[in-house]
Image (spheres, rainbow, N blue to C red):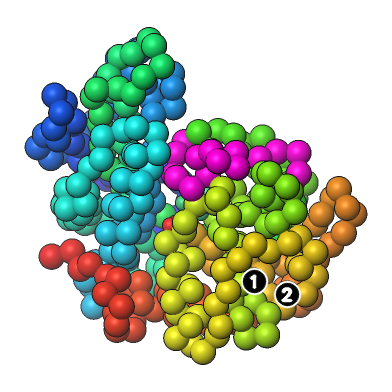
Amino acid sequence: MKEIEWSNLSFGYIPTDYNVRITYRDGQWGELGVCEGEYINLHMAATCLHYGQEAFEGLKAFRGRDGKIRIFRLDENAKRLQASSRGIMMAELPVDRFEEAVLKVVKLNERFVPPYESGASLYIRPLLIGMGAQVGVKPADEYLFLIFVTPVGPYFKEGFKPTPVCITRQYDRAAPQGTGTIKVGGNYAASLVAGAKAREGGYNAALYLDPKEKKYIDECGPANFFAIRDNTYITPVSNSILPSITNKSLMRLAEDMGLKVERRPIPVEELATFEEAAECGTAAVIAPLSHIDDLDENKTYRFSENGKPGPVCEKLYNKLRAIQYGDEPDTYGWITIVE
Ligand SMILES: *Cc1c(COP(=O)(O)O)cnc(C)c1O
């Protein structure tokens, strides 16, 4: 293997030694298989190709100062994959099988877990796809669950710095009663155009509004939204956003730091009152926002004047990272150590 420069990793794909797979056939899940190949042999009429029967997950493993490998809240990812499966009528993988597969694939690829000092981590990507051939619009009768891993760098190359996003009204990533609450590839396909346009305009992402009324903040392409005001952590409730495990964890930490937590619809105009605003998700943990441009209304909402993240975002970020890397005790039972 070519030497990996741990401190120079980006958020991209680097091949590792093994992936793991479980097939669902004849009404049951089979044995966990270990695979070296990076390809899938797939029927051309598989439902994942034609009818979008595909869901995925994303989580990370961290190497601590003590050399141990820690995985963050994998039971939450297992349960969310089950919810996604129910949402698009795929077979549900039991939580213990998901956990077993994650632990196995990380252990097998142990040498790709970046060293503590690099600030990098091992990204874990579980995937569930409909494999059975169907021509009529029906769920498949066969499924493949697989997990690959790849080492990824810290999300912020130049450090933890605020970036801008723009509000989009022209596009929705999900419908009001659609698939926004589950982690399926279809939502991502629907978000590609808006995301590309936002980046062309110099923004890090598009910020979606609720698809029904376009009055309230939903979330960014791949990350939830939260804001800070008057010692309160405020994050949207909506039936078209994905329940982020990072957001859920931050709400808990915020509460324990003495902040109030509010989960409710957030009208766009309220942006003008926030002291801090940020995106959150597994990839970045927290990505603070410098400002939000509302191009249709010709308005800019600013959250950072000096190019620095706000104090609450920074505190939450440091706290969560410290738990993930094992620098602080895991008082919540969020960590699974890979033995
Ligand atoms: C995965 C995802 C997130 C972040 O969820 P985490 O569990 O925190 O990684 C946020 N929004 C969308 C649309 C997602 O797909």
Whether tag 1 and tag 2 are in contact, CB under 8 A, the answer is: yes
Location of residue 197 by image quarter? top right
Determine whether 76 is above or below 129 in the image: below
Look at the image and give the residue range highlighted in magenta: 169-185
Question: Does dot 2 land on a helix, a strand or a loop?
Answer: loop
Q: Is residue 22 visible?
A: yes
Determine whether 117 is above or below 31 in the image: below
Determine whether 179 is above or below 317 in the image: above
Quadrant where the N terminus sits is: top left
Residue reaching furthest right? 298
Q: Residue at x 32, y 59 (%)?
A: 76
Q: Residue at x 73, y 62 (%)?
A: 267
Residue pointed to by mark 1: 227
Determine whether 44 is above or below 12 in the image: above
Residue reaching furthest left? 31
Whether residue 173 appears in magenta in the rendering, the answer is yes
Whether residue 163 appears in magenta in the rendering, the answer is no
Q: Residue at x 40, y 39 (%)?
A: 87
Residue pointed to by mark 2: 274
Identify residue type, mark 2: Phe
Q: Is residue 8 visible?
A: no
Q: Position of residue 153 (x, y in %)?
A: 45, 58
Earlier in the chain: of badge 1 and badge 2, it is 1
Report the Cα–Cα distance between label 1 and label 2.
Answer: 6 Å
